[in-house]
Amino acid sequence: DAGVIQSPRHEVTEMGQEVTLRCKPISGHDYLFWYRQTMMRGLELLIYFNNNVPIDDSGMPEDRFSAKMPNASFSTLKIQPSEPRDSAVYFCASRALGTPHEQFFGPGTRLTVL
Amino acid sequence: AQTVTQSQPEMSVQEAETVTLSCTYDTSESDYYLFWYKQPPSRQMILVIRQEAYKQQNATENRFSVNFQKAAKSFSLKISDSQLGDAAMYFCAYSSSGGGATNKLIFGTGTLLAVQP
């Protein structure tokens, strides 16, 4: 298995533009997580899905952020409109049902909003 | 709410020596999982080792081992025979063992480990 795949690896955009980050989880995994990593806030969970259904989106910072999982092999995180404070590394992770709750992370997308 | 604290922002170790990274956590739950993740400059998050709270035996993975003290809520990582490739940011993380909203990983702030040749 190729592991969790994220695209793009780097994204540079201008304030006000729409940004879409993509994730393909490991085949057979039931859970998908989106995390954001910044120097100020560290690693924080934004949202997670179980069997394609959003379960907990309490970490989504505001309405400009939205996430979808149309099928078991694809998820998107969208920011519209983007702001400079959204600059961060965004990670997608997935895991299978059951113990030991081990999450497998993708390589991350480094987003820079100018 | 659960919290994870790493009190050592940076550590340094000589190649081939042993180093211990500290982690404490706070929870009212009795069953949970603890993890150490490594993040090298490539920024890939790599699982180093995990510990189930119900197991008294400390987990070991090759040169990596933990000292799990449940009563003290302490979970330290020991790296033996340190290698240059061990240089990275290390994150301690907590996960509840129940379902629902407890699936999230709660991370500490990280410890940056430097390995001196």
Image (cartoon, grey):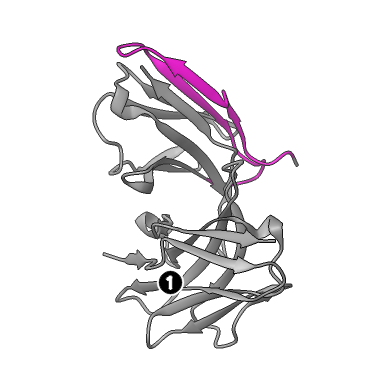
- Foreground: A101 or B68? B68
Crowdedness near tag 1: few (<14), some (14–19) or many (≥20) residues, C-alpha within 10 Å: many
Q: Can the viewer see residue A97 in this picture?
A: no
**Does residue B70 sit above or below A86 in this rendering?**
below
Q: Position of residue B72 (x, y in %)?
A: 37, 86
Residue plotted at (65% across, 59% down)? B86
Q: Position of residue A78 (x, y in %)?
A: 40, 23
Q: Position of residue A63 (x, y in %)?
A: 24, 27
Image quadrant in which the C terminus of chain B is located: bottom right
Look at the image and say whether residue A25 sits in the magenta stretch.
yes
Task: Give the residue type that dot 1 points to.
Answer: Cys
The chain letter under disc 1 is B
Q: Quadrant of the N terminus of chain B?
A: bottom left
Residue A25's image quarter?
top right
Residue matched to label 1: B23
Q: Which residues, given as a range, are shown in magenta?
A: A2-31
Q: Where is residue B101 in the image (x, y as percent from the top left)?
A: 35, 55
Q: Where B95 falls versus A46 (above or below)? A: below
Q: Is residue A5 magenta?
A: yes
Q: Which residue is drawn at 60% across and 68% down?
A: B13
Q: Quadrant of residue B99?
A: bottom left
- Closer to us: A8 or B52: A8
> Quadrant location of residue B26?
bottom left
Left or right: A47 in relation to A75 = left
Element at label 1 = loop
